[in-house]
Image (cartoon, rainbow, N blue to C red):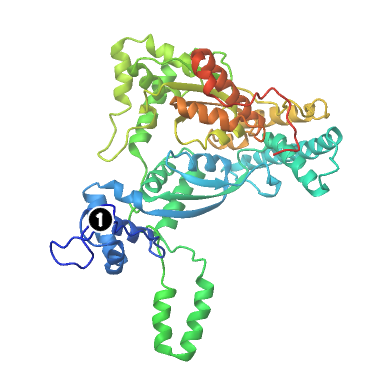
Amino acid sequence: MGTGTDVKAAGAGAGAIAKGNQTDVYAVFGAEPEVLAYAMAKYSRSALSMKESLREISSQRAEEFLNTFYFQYGHRSIADLAHVAFAIERLSMVAAIQLVDEQRWDGQERSTRYQNFRRSGWYTPDFGGRTGEYTEAIEALFAGYDAVNAGMLEALKRAIPRPAEMDEGQYTRTLKARAFDMARYLLPLATNTSLGQIVNARTLETQVSRLLTSEYAEVRELGAKLRGAASGAAWDLKADECRILVDEIAAVNAEAGERARQVLLREVKVSPTLVKYAAVNEYAQKTAVELKQVAEELLAGVEIAQAPVVDLVEPMALEVEIAASLLYTHCHHPYRQVRELVAALPAGRRDEIVRMGAKHRGRHDELLRAWSAGQGLAFDLLMDIGGFRDLHRHRKCTQLMQGYTTAHGFELPDAPGQPTLAESGLLVKYTAAMEEAHGASRRLATADAAGAHYLLPLGTRCRSLFKMDFAEAVYISELRSTVAGHYSYRRVAWEMYLAVQRAHPTLAEYFRISDVNEPVDLLKR
C-alpha cells in the first residue's frame, strides 16, 4: 500500500488516480530572473509544470506578461520571484549605508576589520573652489588612520606575547584585525568600499527609487546606475569560455556555430522590465520637506537632551508613536524627548502631523517606514557610525536613522582588556584628527551641507531608533555581545540587555549573553 497524498497520475486519463506520494522536486538553473518569475507566477494561472512553462516562455512573452500584471494590475508580489545579483564597487560609505538600508536585503560588504582601507581611495563631492580644503582634510584623516593602525599594532604586540603554539602569521593577522578595529574610527565616510547584493526585483525597484530621492548626488547617480545595470546587459561569468567553444564549433560547421552563438552568447538582461519605471519617490520627497519644517518649528530653541547609549523607550499611544517617529529622522534630539513634546501637543495638532505623513502617498506607494509602529520594544541608540553599520545589518526590526551631525561628538575606540589610546601614546593624535575633521565638516557645510558629511569619521556619534519584538532583542543582544565582535556594538548589545532586564526582570534569564566588561582573549576571534 502506498502512503501519502493521492494525486492524479501524470499522463493518466480523466479520473485516473495514483496511490502514493507523487511529489516532484527539482532545482532550476539557467532561466533569466524575469522569465523564472513569470514561470512561477503561472502556477496560479495554468496547470503547466515549471519545466513546461519555462520551455514555452521567451523573454518577450515574460515582458508582455509583466507589463500587464505588474504595472497595470499592480500584482507586485510577482517581482518577489525575480532575484538578481549585483556587484557595486567603489562607492563611498555614505552611499553604502543608504544602499543597504532595506528591510528585505541580502548582501556582504568589505570588512574594515580584515582590509586596509587606506588603499581604497575616496569620493569627492563638488565643492567648487573649496575642493582642495576637502582633500586636505581627507588626507589628514587617512594619515591619522595609518598612525593609529600602526601604533596600535605595535602596542598590541608589546602587551600580548605570541603563544608558543601559535605561528607568527596567525598571530600577526589576529592582532592586525584588532588594530584595524581601532583605526577604523578615523575612516571618513568618503572612503570607498565595495559590496555585493542579491535582491528580488520588488526590493530593487523600491531601492532604486529611494536612492534616486537621496539628498546626496553620488547616491542619486548610484540609483541610476543600478537601474541601468538591471535593464542593460549583465556580465556573464562564462562568456569567454563560451566564445572559444562557439569559435571551435564554427570551425567545424558554420551553421552549427551560428546556432551556438545565438544560444551561448546572446545578451542577457536580468531585469529589463520590473525596474524600468523606478523613479524619484515624490511621496517621500515632499513629505520630508514638510516634516522637517514641522520638526524645526517644534524643536526651535530646544536644547538636545542628554541621553544614554541605549534608551529603551516605554510603549505609548499609537498616535503619539507614529507622530514622534515621523519627526524623529528630521532632528537630532533623542526619541524620548521628541515623544514627550509630541504627547504634550493638542490632539488636533498631533493628528495633523500624522496626516502629513500620508497626504502625498500615491496609489502604489507603501507607507513611510516611520509608520511601522506598535512593536513592544523601541531602543534609541547613540553610538559611533562604524558600530551602527554593524547593527544596521539586522533586518527583522524597524530602523530609523537621523542625519549625520557633529553635535553628538565622537567615540574613543578604547575597550576592556586591550591597550588604550592614552597608554599607546596615540590619544592626542586621535583626538586632534577627530576635532579637525569635525571642524572642516562644519566649515564646508556652508558650501555643501550634504557633501560635508563625507568628512565625518566613522567614530562620529549618530542616533538611530530600533523597534523590535522581544525575540529580536534577544537575538541582537546575544549575537552582538560575543567576544569575537567589535567592542562598539558589544557595548550597545549589553546595554540593550540591561535595559530589558530593568523593564522586564523576569524575562532577563532568557538572554544567553556575554558580559562585555569582562576582559577577552584578543588572540581569539
Give the mark count.
1
Identify the residue at horizontal 79%, vertical 29% (top origin): 419
Residue 358, located in which quarter of the rendered image? top left
Visible in this render: residue 215? yes
The image shows residue 321 at horizontal and vertical percentages of 38, 19
Q: Residue furthest front?
A: 1
Up/down of 368 relative to 342, above or below: below
Up/down of 45 relative to 103, above or below: below
Q: Is residue 2 left or right of residue 490?
A: left
Identify the residue at horizontal 63%, vertical 39% (top origin): 130
Q: Is residue 132 left or right of residue 9?
A: right
The image shows residue 318 at horizontal and vertical percentages of 34, 18
The image shows residue 270 at horizontal and vertical percentages of 40, 60
How crowded pointer 1 is (Cα within 10 Å; few <14, some 14-19, many 20+) is rated as few
Residue 6, located in which quarter of the rendered image? bottom left
| Residue closer to the observer: 11 or 160 | 11
| Residue closer to the observer: 412 or 437 | 412
Q: Amino acid at mark 1?
A: Tyr
| Residue closer to the observer: 105 or 340 | 105
Report helix, strand or loop for mark 1: helix
The image shows residue 201 at horizontal and vertical percentages of 37, 50
| Residue closer to the observer: 522 or 459 | 522
Q: Residue furthest left?
A: 14
Q: Quadrant of the N terminus?
A: bottom left
Up/down of 249 relative to 203, above or below: below
Residue bearing mark 1? 43
Visible in this render: residue 445? no
Q: Quadrant of the C terminus?
A: top right
